[in-house]
Image (cartoon, coloured by chain):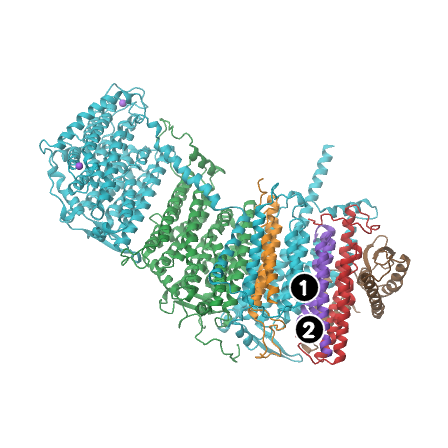
């Protein structure tokens, strides 16, 4: 198999496997295991098959362009280090799969488990094999996500949920830091390619952004590897099923942080900052983790803190910056993976067989499960650094490195003591793990009767423990070449010669080991009394409950702070929003004016016309009056608005815009009727009772609004004046004037623009009208009036009472009398207005008028009948289907536009010509007229629909009110 | 003349904005209407003002000497009027629906807390 | 401003006369609207403008355009007709409305002459 | 009028009026507009027919002209009268008031014409018509003698209207 | 000369009509009752129409005629609607 | 103008229009024909949009810009008549609109289209408005289409009515009406100073504007910009957005996702076209404001994402984040950033659109008030620490529906938060790397980076984090809730659109290379969009000589 295919296969196999695992039925436990196991084994095989090449120093590469624009290639890159790591991932992955077969309950939904596990394996391999830093981050984030899902596998369990979320939050923060760090590396190096980045070490270290990059990358690594102060998520992740813990939290996921440190070691390590930060974090984690591990009552908790401690150890080693330390780090990565995975599995077996992981309740299990106990003891001994086991070797190398002098600071000098102390702690907790659970009197009151697990469940542990032993006894023959291959990939030519041997003679490190062993045993027996009291955690630990602390910070930041900030920075009320809108627009417009000078003050281009001035005096009075009255005197405001509208309309006439005047006027009329129709549904408001005024203060809000209004008015006036007093610019208008008749076939230039030059605008505009009409109709169909406006208006009630009180009158005769004459006239006007509408429609192209004006006129003709005769009366006689009018109007206008296609012209291309009709003579024929007809139909339909839909509410609610009355009457009768 | 129109536009805008910022829906709709008058006049003014020069051709020939007012803003205003009308209608119905469903005519659909 | 300046004097003067009378009448009507004390009196005032006032101005317009364009320009007649037909509608309705509203507030309208109170005029 | 013609021209006067209106609106008597005007006169009344207006049978179309000639000077006279009142030249002790007038006219169209006349004439305004009692109430700006108004309205206008709309 | 007189008369007439509009708007603002305001608006419309007619004479074009016609034919609709609203509390029943 | 294909440009506007008109002629009860028309139109429009995209992509980017086709409506030449302009950007937006619309429409067929009358007609008209806004090359015509799409959106937002919708609708409409007034003032001011409405013509005239008119032009552009930014939801103009979108029915909210993008589209197009590097004294006008406004929008959005109590509102805020990111990217201005932003636009629009659909399906099985409860439980603890020993450590099987919903939720969350493996990550990465290396990664060489870039970078990263936290919270309380929930009844046509949208995201992830190449070409063509031989304006001297040639 060519290497590139092989590399892809290594990544793809688990991912594809994950997909198929997800599809299996919920109880297909064995099938899942077969699938997952096969995948893991295949991957292992593939990885091992590359060993000869890798061992010879070759770097296998697959490079596929993915996002070449931004330097992101899909690049897989297998060197010695990646080989070692990927091997670890797949081998332990296989063992965990096997173990999980027996660990998971038949009732557990295994497809999800194995699917996630395989996906995780794929993501891990993706990180490890990444040859592009962005791709590395890509898979890195994926591992965070999948670990979240795996920790939360038993999501009905609150601890699992919280642990998962905490893990995700912490590692996601780290992941984002890493992303930024990597982006900065790209910025510095000019590439995200790992090879290029590793080669650019000196450039990076010399760059002014080195420190930020370093900190960001380290944040990514430390959060992932649970380094102090980000260690707290790992113990909380122990709510995951044990196979997950064994896999993620010993061998793989948490190793990614140190993997990254090692991977970027050539590019980043070796500076003072690196040493200071990495070593101090490493040593704190090492000590803190080990110390806290002693006091855990949960087997898995103990292992979690121990893992933290060991990761601290590896971090520390990588921080030292010496090649030998790097060798030790890589070696310990392997060793820790083997013994910690086996210990997790052992803890899981105990949990599985006894129903608890609480060291306080476990005791004397050796009698029930001697084989497991023996295996666990060997693994724990490896963890404690007992000679002849692999842990001893790497720990000795570690001790030796701490003794070396690196940069000569206090920290450097203090390291041996710290290391020894950590050794003492680790012996103590290892002893506690073994002694607390396997020795002592037989356990009482366990949920289950303990016994040995099935053999195949123990098999992974046996294999791993065997590895511990072999490596521990004959390292040079077994692990040395692999280690060398891995380390060479990191250190390259500077790889030191190292000698893996059990016995180096009586050295300082050996002394440290002895002190650690003896001290650890002593410490354990001193602490036994305290531990037996059953307190979870070290003395005074109740003061700092990291999980609670984390939760509270999260809630405070992400919820309480966010909510109060949202209220400060935003609002859900309309008034402030509008105020901001107006204010922002004011500021936006003011900035260029203020920056470049106003240039506004020029004399008017024409003299002040006293008549127009008086007319505008009227208009201004109306505008101000409307603003003043709109709250308490709605009708008055409406009337004044009408006045302002009239003045606007007169202005249009004055300033040569007859079409505008016509349209404005008609719209004015329809709007007035519309608002009047709405007025009936608004609440009564009496002057003096102001629901919006706050007691005893002239509202500063009103003052602010007043200033805003004045500024907005002034601003708009200023802009208008500035433009109007400037000479006109070279405008597109001349084209319209020149071509309106010759090419547009009409003399009314405005109308020709509307239906021809810019007919598309009109097309859109009528569609808007149609849409609004439909919306209004839809909304009103479900209209529900407020309780206090359901009643028939007071006037009508009085008049009805009057009619009922007089014997010779019947209900409604008052209104009939009042409307008798007006309705006769209104009816008579119906055909007149229709003819008028047709007139306006037909002449539009040449004179003021047009489809819209005609349509409104027609609509008013209808409305007038409704006003005069009432809804029922009209609808008994006229059947108007306004929605059809709208649809028809759209169709006509659209079809007129589309007709041009048949003449191979663009949409809306017009045709204007003359038709010779006998007797009558030449008749102008313009497609624009057909278009205007569409406009007309639509406007009629829309306007009538809106008005009538609103008018119908009255009779609907009258009906309802009457029905309610009848109900009360009948119920009263029943009561009697 | 420009001055009068500018002051008129300003007053309409100012009154409209004042109403726009008021708490009652009816005030807002009147405000929007006043603003739309102002905007229409503003657009219209952008073609510069001219008396007695309506954009209607005489005798069906373009008289090069005749100076017509700029027809483009007029066409724009016509479109704006129509759309403004539609929107006023819509806003009215929505405010009525809001009044019906919430029982109040406050713009936020609830009476302000005291 | 005047687009055509070739009106014969008689026409110009006649048009001016009608215009003068019409505008004055309309103004007087509106002054009346302002001066009268009660609604029922005020309601009479605008009719000055809608009848003779408008009529005179329309006649002036007809004279002006007919002479100016040397053809009958009499479409102003339409305005006259429509004014006569439509003004009464709103006035009648308005009077009826005032009648009811007074009634509602307990004022006996038929005897009432003065002393209208400014009650809240907003309805709805 | 034959029933067929009646169906085509339900309101002949209206048809004529609309035809004239069309020509006036277009300021043209070109053949095209004559046709269109005829169409308007033909079709638009059908819209009115849908509304089922009160039947209006006009007996004496010429009486309409007479009525117009009678109303016109009245309006001019009233204009002057009201104008004098407004500028303060009227009598000091002017009294405004309501006048009830018993009417014989019951046709809705006739009443409508009367209403227009009364309201259009400055100084008088139509207030109410009680359909049960047949009483018309008007408001008069300068009420000298109630009976004088009653007589004038009945004699000058109602009589003619009764003649037109029997 | 006669044209000058006519011009001056037109100006006078326009001033009269615009002052008439101002009077109407004073009534419209002052009320005191809603019917007075509506009446004011009605008068404002009429005066506005007449002003447009004089403007037509002043500019010598009949193009503004339609605007005036529309006010007379349809302008009463809004005042009528207002009156009906005052009378019945509803425009369309 | 002979081939039918030439007229294809206008089809995205006309097809929905005719569909809407036809829908109005059918009775409300005739469901089958109405649904058929609606679907045919939506899918047909989308297919046409894809064809147009291919056509636009075939035009090489050169000094003359890269306008694929100019369609003169009414056969009037630019700048006098209105023209439609097809280029990469407009085609891209058309396709995006179409895809989102198809998904929402199909989704709505399960139940929502019957929540009120005229859903399909309004939907088609919204499509018409959107497509028109994307295609038009005329500033005032843009206003018309804006109003059209707004009007339809008002109708659709209020579809189904009810208290929340009406209350939100009132705000939405009031704000947008005020903004429309600003639009008009801005457009007319620009016309008053430049004498043209055609965008390309404007771009040509702006450099030559005399200095004593320039401030008016800029004031007009600023006012116009405010109107667009209201639509885009920029802080402090976008507070209405989360409320309105949360209130809308899910398919409507989903299709609304594209509406914020209309504002951004216009800002992008106009700021590069009118105020690009060649705009003389007005070059880069407003860019700084966009940058800072965008940053503030992201900040506000991320705060809102955290503070939101229900998922739809949260998505609304995520939409603000997306808007802010895009605005800031537009303000940033560099071509690779714009290219990255376009990719981000597509990815985030599809993701948020899918999420709006999904949320309703997910929430269907939940009891009201569960959201609030979950938050308070998290905040004040629910005694979960005392996990009982005996608690059975055995999982519960997830029903298939829930599993699919959960997976989709996860996918949406990843997309929005910008986490791998979907396009969200690619988008965010592209933006960030382009920001850091605005010239080119290869010769970045540690060039100096402005403070605003760092701020933007931090804010974008933080927004991702906030999204992760908030969506984890939302997802956990939805899918991992200890509160008993019924499995929602979900129909296949409801899941299908969500899946399709997510699949689309997956496709652009895998095909990131070619897609990004297209985006970069788009960005480049926007920069080069000056009038040239293939440009929008005819190569004639202005003013055009009056031609006596008769119109056909
Ligand atoms: Na040392
Ligand atoms: Na124990």
Tint applied to chain D in the drawing: brown
Judging by colour alone, the chain drawn in purple in this rendered image is: E
- Quadrant of residue A464 in the image? top left
Check the image and report above or below for D43 versus A700: below
Q: Do labels 2 and 1 share a chain?
A: no
**Residue F405 relative to residue C44: left or right:** left
Tint applied to chain A in the drawing: cyan
According to the picture, the residue beneath numbered tag 1 turns out to be: A614
- State which mark lies toward you, 2 or 1: 1
Tell me residue F226's x, y (percent). 49, 57
Tint applied to chain B in the drawing: orange
Which chain does the residue under circle 2 lie in?
Answer: E
Q: Viewer-proximal residue, D97 or A441?
A: D97
Quadrant position of ligand 1: top left
The reply to whether residue A940 is in sight is yes
Query: For the residues marked 2 and 1, what is the alpha-carbon distance in whole angstroms?
Result: 17 Å
Q: Viewer-proximal residue, D7 or A458?
A: A458
Determine the secondary structure under disc 1.
Answer: helix
According to the picture, the residue beneath numbered tag 2 turns out to be: E58
Tell me residue E32's x, y (percent). 73, 52
Q: Viewer-proximal residue, F31 or A549?
A: A549
Tint applied to chain C in the drawing: red
Check the image and report above or below for D24 versus F242: below
Q: Does the residue labelled 2 lie within 8 Å of ligand 1?
A: no
Tint applied to chain F in the drawing: green
Determine the secondary structure under disc 2.
Answer: helix
């Amino acid at each position: 198999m060519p290497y590139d295919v092989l590399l892809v296969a290594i990544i793809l196999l688990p991912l594809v496997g994950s997909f198929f695992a997800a599809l299996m039925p919920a109880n297909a436990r064995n099938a899942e295991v077969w699938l997952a196991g096969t995948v893991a084994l295949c991957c292992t095989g593939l990885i091992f098959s590359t060993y000869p090449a890798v061992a010879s120093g070759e770097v296998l590469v697959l490079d596929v362009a993915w996002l070449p624009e931004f330097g992101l290639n899909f690049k897989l890159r297998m060197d010695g280090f990646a080989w070692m790591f990927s091997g670890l991932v797949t081998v332990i992955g296989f063992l965990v799969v096997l173990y999980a077969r027996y660990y998971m309950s038949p009732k557990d939904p295994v497809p999800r488990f194995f699917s996630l596990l395989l996906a995780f394996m794929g993501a891990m391999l993706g990180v490890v094999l990444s040859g592009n830093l962005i791709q590395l981050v890509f898979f890195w984030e994926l591992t965070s996500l999948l670990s979240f899902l795996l920790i939360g596998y038993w999501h009905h369990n609150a601890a699992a949920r919280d642990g998962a979320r905490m893990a995700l939050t912490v590692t996601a923060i780290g992941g984002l830091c890493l992303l930024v760090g990597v982006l900065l590396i790209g910025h510095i190096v000019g590439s995200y390619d790992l090879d290029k980045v590793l080669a650019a070490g000196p450039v990076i270290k010399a760059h002014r952004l080195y420190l930020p990059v370093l900190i960001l990358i380290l944040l990514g690594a430390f959060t992932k590897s649970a380094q102090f102060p980000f260690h707290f998520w790992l113990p909380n992740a122990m709510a995951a099923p044990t196979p997950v813990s064994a896999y993620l939290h010993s061998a793989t996921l948490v190793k990614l942080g140190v993997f990254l440190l090692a991977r970027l070691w050539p590019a980043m390590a070796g500076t003072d900052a690196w040493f200071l930060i990495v070593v101090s974090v490493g040593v704190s984690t090492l000590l803190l983790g080990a110390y806290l591990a002693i006091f855990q009552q949960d087997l898995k908790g103990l292992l979690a803190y121990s893992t933290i401690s060991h990761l601290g150890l590896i971090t520390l080693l990588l921080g030292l910056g010496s090649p030998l330390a790097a060798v030790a780090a890589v070696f310990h990565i392997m060793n820790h993976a083997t013994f910690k995975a086996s210990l997790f599995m052992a803890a899981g077996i105990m949990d599985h067989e006894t129903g608890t992981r609480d060291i306080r309740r476990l005791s004397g299990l050796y009698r029930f499960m001697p084989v497991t106990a023996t295996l666990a003891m060997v693994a724990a001994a490896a963890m404690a650094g007992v000679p002849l086991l692999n842990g001893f070797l790497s720990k000795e190398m570690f001790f030796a490195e701490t003794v070396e002098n690196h940069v000569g600071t206090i920290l450097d000098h203090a390291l041996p003591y710290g290391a020894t102390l950590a050794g003492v702690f680790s012996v103590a907790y290892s002893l506690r793990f073994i002694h607390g659970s396997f020795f002592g009197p037989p356990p009482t009151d366990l949920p289950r009767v303990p016994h040995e697990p099935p053999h195949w469940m123990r098999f992974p542990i046996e294999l791993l423990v065997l590895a511990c032993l072999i490596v521990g006894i004959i390292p040079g023959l077994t692990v040395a070449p692999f280690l060398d291959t891995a380390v060479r990939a990191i250190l390259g030519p500077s790889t030191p010669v190292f000698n893996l041997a059990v016995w180096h003679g009586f050295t300082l490190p050996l002394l440290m080991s002895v002190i650690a062993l003896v001290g650890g045993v002593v410490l354990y027996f001193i602490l036994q009394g305290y531990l037996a009291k059953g307190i979870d955690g070290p003395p005074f630990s109740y003061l700092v409950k990291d999980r609670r602390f984390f939760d509270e910070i999260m809630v405070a930041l992400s919820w309480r702070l966010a909510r109060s900030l949202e209220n400060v920075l935003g609002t859900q009320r309309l008034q402030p929003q509008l105020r901001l809108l107006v204010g922002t627009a004011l500021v936006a417009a003011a900035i260029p004016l203020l920056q470049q000078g106003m240039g506004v003050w020029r004399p008017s281009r024409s003299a002040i016309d006293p008549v127009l001035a008086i007319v505008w005096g009227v208009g201004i009075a109306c505008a101000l009056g409307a603003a003043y009255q709109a709250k308490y005197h709605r009708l008055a405001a409406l009337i004044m608005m009408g006045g302002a509208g009239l003045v606007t309309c007169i202005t249009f006439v004055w300033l040569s815009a007859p079409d505008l005047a016509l349209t404005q006027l008609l719209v004015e009329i329809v709007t007035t009727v519309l608002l009047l129709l709405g007025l009936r549904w608004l609440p009564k408001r009496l002057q003096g009772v102001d629901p919006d005024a706050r007691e005893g203060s002239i509202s500063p809000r009103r003052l602010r609004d007043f200033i805003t209004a004045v500024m907005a008015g002034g601003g708009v006036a200023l802009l208008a004046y500035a433009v109007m007093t400037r000479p006109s610019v070279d405008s597109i208008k001349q084209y319209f004037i020149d071509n309106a008749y010759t090419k547009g076939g009409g003399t009314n230039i405005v109308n020709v623009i509307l239906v021809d030059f810019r007919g598309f605008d009109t097309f859109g505009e009528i569609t808007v009208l149609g849409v609004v009409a439909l919306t209004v109709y839809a909304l009103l169909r479900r209209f529900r009036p407020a309780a206090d406006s359901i009643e028939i208006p007071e006037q009508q009630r009085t008049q009805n009472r009057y009619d009922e009180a007089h014997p010779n009158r019947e209900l409604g005769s008052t209104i009939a009398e009042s409307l008798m004459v007006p309705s006769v006239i209104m009816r008579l006007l119906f055909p007149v207005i229709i003819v008028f509408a047709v007139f306006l429609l037909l002449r539009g192209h040449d004179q003021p008028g047009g489809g819209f004006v005609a349509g409104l006129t027609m609509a008013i003709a209808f409305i007038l009948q409704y006003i005069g005769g009432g809804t029922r009366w009209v609808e008994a006689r006229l059947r108007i289907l306004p929605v059809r009018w709208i649809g028809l109007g759209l169709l006509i206008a659209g079809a007129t536009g589309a007709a041009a296609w048949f003449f191979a012209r663009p949409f809306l291309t017009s045709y204007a010509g003359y038709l010779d009709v006998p007797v009558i003579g030449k008749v102008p024929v313009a497609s624009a007229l057909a278009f205007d007809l569409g406009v007309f139909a639509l406007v009629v339909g829309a306007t009538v629909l809106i008005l009538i839909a609103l008018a119908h509410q009255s009779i609907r609610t009258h009906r309802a009110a009457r029905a309610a009355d009848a109900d009360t009457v009948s119920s009263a009768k029943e009561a009697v | 003349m420009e001055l009068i129109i500018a002051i008129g536009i300003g007053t309409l805008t100012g009154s409209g904005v004042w109403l726009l910022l008021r708490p009652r829906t009816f005030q807002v709709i009147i405000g929007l209407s006043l603003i739309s008058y102002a905007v229409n006049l503003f657009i219209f003014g952008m073609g510069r003002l001219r008396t007695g020069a309506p954009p209607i051709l005489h005798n069906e020939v373009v008289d090069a000497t005749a100076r017509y007012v700029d027809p483009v803003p007029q066409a724009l205003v016509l479109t704006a009027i129509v759309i403004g009308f539609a929107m006023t209608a819509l806003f009215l119905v929505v405010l009525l629906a809001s009044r019906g469903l919430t029982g109040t005519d406050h713009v936020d659909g609830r009476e302000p807390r005291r | 401003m005047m687009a055509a300046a070739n009106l014969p004097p008689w026409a110009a003067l006649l048009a001016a006369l009608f215009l003068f009378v019409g505008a004055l009448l309309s103004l007087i009507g509106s002054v009346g609207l302002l001066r009268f004390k009660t609604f029922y009196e005020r309601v009479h005032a605008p009719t000055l403008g809608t009848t003779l006032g408008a009529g005179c101005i329309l006649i002036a317009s007809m004279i002006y355009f007919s002479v100016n364009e040397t053809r009958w320009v009499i479409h102003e007649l339409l305005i006259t007709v429509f004014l006569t037909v439509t003004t009464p509608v709103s006035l009648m309705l308005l009077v009826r409305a005032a009648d009811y509203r007074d009634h509602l507030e307990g004022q006996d309208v038929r005897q009432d002459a003065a002393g209208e109170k400014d009650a809240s005029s907003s309805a709805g | 009028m034959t029933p067929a013609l009646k169906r085509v021209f339900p309101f002949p006067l209206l048809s004529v009026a609309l035809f004239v209106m069309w020509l006036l609106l277009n300021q043209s008597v070109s053949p095209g507009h004559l046709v269109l005007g005829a169409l308007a006169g033909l079709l638009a009344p059908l819209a009115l027919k849908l509304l089922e207006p009160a039947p209006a049978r006009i007996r004496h179309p010429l009486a309409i002209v007479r009525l117009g000639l009678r109303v016109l000077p009245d309006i001019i006279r009233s204009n002057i009268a009201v104008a004098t009142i407004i500028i303060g030249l009227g009598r000091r002790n002017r009294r405004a008031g309501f006048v009830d007038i018993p009417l014989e006219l019951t046709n809705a169209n006739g009443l409508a014409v009367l209403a227009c006349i009364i309201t259009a004439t400055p100084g008088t305004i139509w207030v109410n018509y009680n359909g049960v009692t047949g009483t018309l109430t008007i408001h008069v700006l300068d009420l000298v003698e109630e009976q004088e108004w009653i007589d004038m309205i009945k004699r000058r206008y109602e009589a003619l209207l009764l003649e037109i709309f029997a | 000369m006669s044209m000058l007189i006519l011009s001056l008369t037109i100006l006078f007439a326009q001033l009269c009509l615009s002052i008439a509009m101002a009077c109407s708007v004073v009534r419209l603002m002052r009320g005191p009752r809603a019917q007075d305001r509506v009446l004011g608006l009605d008068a404002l419309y009429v005066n506005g129409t007449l002003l447009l007619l004089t403007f037509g004479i002043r500019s010598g074009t009949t193009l503004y005629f339609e605007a005036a016609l529309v006010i007379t034919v349809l302008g009463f609709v809004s005042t009528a609607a207002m009156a009906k609203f005052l009378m019945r509390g509803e425009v369309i029943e | 103008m002979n081939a039918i294909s030439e007229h294809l440009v206008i089809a995205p506007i006309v097809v929905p229009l005719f569909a809407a008109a036809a829908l109005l002629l059918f009775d409300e009860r005739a469901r089958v024909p109405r649904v058929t028309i609606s679907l045919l139109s939506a899918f047909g429009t989308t297919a046409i949009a894809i064809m147009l995209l291919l056509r636009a992509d075939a035009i090489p980017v050169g000094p003359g810009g890269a306008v694929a086709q100019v369609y003169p409506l009414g056969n009037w030449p630019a700048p006098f008549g209105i023209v439609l302009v097809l280029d990469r950007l407009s085609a891209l937006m058309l396709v995006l609109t179409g895809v989102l619309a198809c998904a929402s429409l199909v989704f709505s067929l399960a139940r929502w289209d019957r929540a009120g009358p005229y859903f399909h007609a309004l939907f088609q008209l919204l499509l018409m408005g959107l497509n028109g806004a994307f295609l038009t090359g005329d500033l005032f015509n843009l206003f018309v289409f804006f109003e059209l799409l707004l009007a339809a959106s008002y109708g659709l937002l209020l579809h189904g009515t009810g208290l929340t919708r009406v209350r939100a609708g009132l705000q939405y409409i009031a704000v947008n009406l005020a903004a429309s007034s600003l639009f008009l003032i801005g457009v007319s001011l620009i016309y008053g100073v430049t004498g043209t409405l055609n965008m390309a013509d404007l771009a040509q005239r702006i450099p030559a504007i005399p200095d004593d008119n320039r401030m008016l032009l800029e004031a007009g552009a600023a006012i116009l910009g405010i109107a667009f930014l209201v639509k885009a939801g920029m802080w402090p103009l976008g507070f209405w957005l989360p409320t309105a979108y949360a209130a809308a029915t899910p398919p409507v909210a989903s299709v609304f996702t594209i509406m914020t993008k209309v504002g951004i589209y216009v800002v992008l197009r106009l700021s590069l076209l009118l105020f690009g590097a060649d705009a003389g004294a007005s070059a880069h006008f407003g860019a700084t404001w966009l940058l800072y406004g965008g940053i503030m929008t992201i900040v506000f959005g991320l705060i809102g994402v955290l503070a939101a109590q229900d998922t739809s509102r949260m998505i609304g805020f995520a939409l603000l984040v997306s808007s802010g990111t895009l605005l800031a990217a537009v303000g940033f201005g560099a071509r690779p950033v714009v290219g990255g932003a376009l990719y981000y636009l597509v990815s985030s629009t599809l993701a948020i659109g899918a999420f709006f659909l999904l949320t309703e399906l997910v929430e269907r099985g939940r009891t009201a008030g569960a959201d609030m409860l979950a938050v308070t439980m998290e905040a004040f603890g629910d005694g979960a620490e005392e996990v009982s020993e005996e608690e059975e450590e055995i999982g519960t099987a997830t029903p298939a529906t829930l599993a699919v919903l959960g997976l989709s939720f996860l996918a949406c969350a990843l997309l929005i938060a910008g986490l791998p493996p979907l396009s969200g990550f690619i988008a965010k990465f592209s933006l960030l790397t382009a920001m850091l290396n605005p010239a080119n990664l290869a010769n970045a060489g540690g060039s100096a980076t402005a403070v605003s870039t760092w701020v933007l970078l931090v804010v974008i990263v933080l927004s991702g984090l906030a999204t992760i936290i908030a969506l984890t919270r939302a997802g956990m309380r939805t899918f991992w809730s200890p509160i008993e929930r019924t499995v929602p009844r979900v129909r296949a046509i409801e899941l299908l659109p969500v899946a399709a949208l997510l699949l689309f995201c997956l496709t652009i992830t895998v095909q990131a290379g070619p897609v990004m190449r297209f985006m970069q070409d788009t960005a480049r063509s926007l920069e080069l969009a000056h009038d040239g031989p293939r440009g929008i304006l005819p190569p004639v001297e202005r003013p055009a000589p009056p031609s006596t040639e008769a119109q056909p």
